Amino acid sequence: CLKCVLNSLELYLNESVPYLDGPVSPLQFYRDWIGPNKPCIIRNAFSDWPALSKWNPAYLRETVGSKVISVAVTPNGYADAVNGDRFVMPEERQMTFSSLLDIIEGKVKSSGVFYVQKQCSNLTEELPQLTEDVQTHIPWMSEALGKLPDAVNFWIGEENAVTSMHKDHYENLYCVISGEKRFILIPPTDRPFIPYELYQPATYKQKQDDSFEIVDEEDSEKVPWIPLDPLNPDLDRYPSYRLARPLYCTVKAGEMLYLPSLWFHHVRQSHGCIAVNFWYDMDYDIKYNYFQLVESLTGAVGSV
């Protein structure tokens, strides 16, 4: 029954995301956080990284300024998000890192919103010169899970860049190097209250007059995605969302968020914020099967 679900959530969840003063042993972290599938923010988890003091625009220009990277460009900051009856992906533009910094620093005007968000281990693949300033895995997490991360991703962009609500099949360690990230987190147990609908996939394309058009992806299957904006939820259209229990947290420079697998999350950032995250593949264990059961019982469009 619904009352039982809500009561069990009170036992499972904190009212806010807890803080740890530093990393704990791999065994304790697994027992306290990975096993229970609960998020936390860890301070002093990467205080020895040179990136914390070195990654400013001058250093980045000198070190990787000439490197060509993949940048997501949108008219409104919403990449991989619902727009009307379409699921719209960003225009993926190849540009030098210095050209991106010119836009972020306001030296060059642009009609779009620019965000480095390519999630294919772009730190190690596109910017290997920067790996000397960080770690390419988190030793205590790798030991806790018995594996290395599938991907190490680099993030930088404008304040208007927003990550729409979604979930990932990864244990995620999200490290903010400069600026801050603002997360809305919703536990996987709230899946019955999260709406999904099917959308025609499409891509933004900037035209010569700097306006953007939406171009359909031909011969592509429809994409299940969350149409709800947690910043301004349409409760008339999605009344069940009233029962969701979002957690709000801000991850500041030098802090690491442990974002457990299958948690729904929506992300905003300060202008020019730089972050690195580590994606460890989740274990497809009994918890995953329980989630699949909850999902099937919602009777709604399946998520990905």
Image: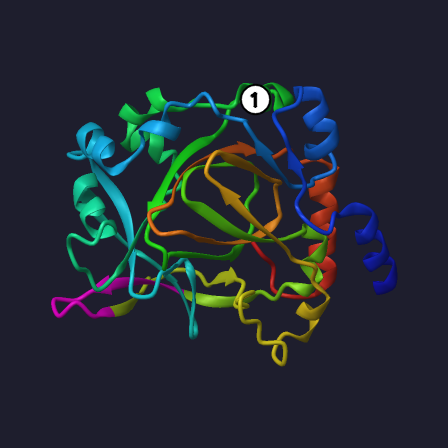
Secondary element at image label 1: helix
For the residue pair 19 and 100, the one nearer the viewer reads as 19
Q: Residue at x 68, y 33 (%)?
A: 34
10 Å crowding of disc 1: few (<14), some (14-19), many (20+): some
User: Dot 1 corresponds to which residue?
Assistant: 142
Asked if the stretch drawn in magenta spans residue 208, the answer is yes
Q: Residue at x 37, y 56 (%)?
A: 161
- Spot occupied by residue 109 in the image (x, y as percentages of width and height): 17, 59
In the drawing, does residue 204 fall left or right of residue 142?
Answer: left
In the drawing, does residue 14 fall left or right of residue 213?
Answer: right
For the residue pair 81 and 173, the one nearer the viewer reads as 173
- Spot occupied by residue 283 in the image (x, y as percentages of width and height): 64, 33
- Spot occupied by residue 126 in the image (x, y as percentages of width and height): 28, 32
In the drawing, does residue 206 fall left or right of residue 195?
Answer: left
In the drawing, does residue 29 fall left or right of residue 139?
Answer: right
For the residue pair 43 and 69, the one nearer the viewer reads as 43
- Spot occupied by residue 183 in the image (x, y as percentages of width and height): 54, 51
Whether residue 42 can be seen here: yes
Q: How is the image coloured?
A: rainbow
Quadrant of residue 284 within the rendered picture: top right
Q: Residue at x 55, y 68 (%)?
A: 228
Whether residue 173 can be seen here: no
Which quadrant is the N terminus positioned in? Answer: bottom right
Query: How many numbered discs sit on the rendered protein?
Result: 1
Q: Residue at x 18, y 48 (%)?
A: 102
The boundaries of the magenta stretch are 201-212
Asked if the stretch drawn in magenta spans residue 130, the answer is no
In the picture shown, does residue 249 fall above or below 287?
Answer: below
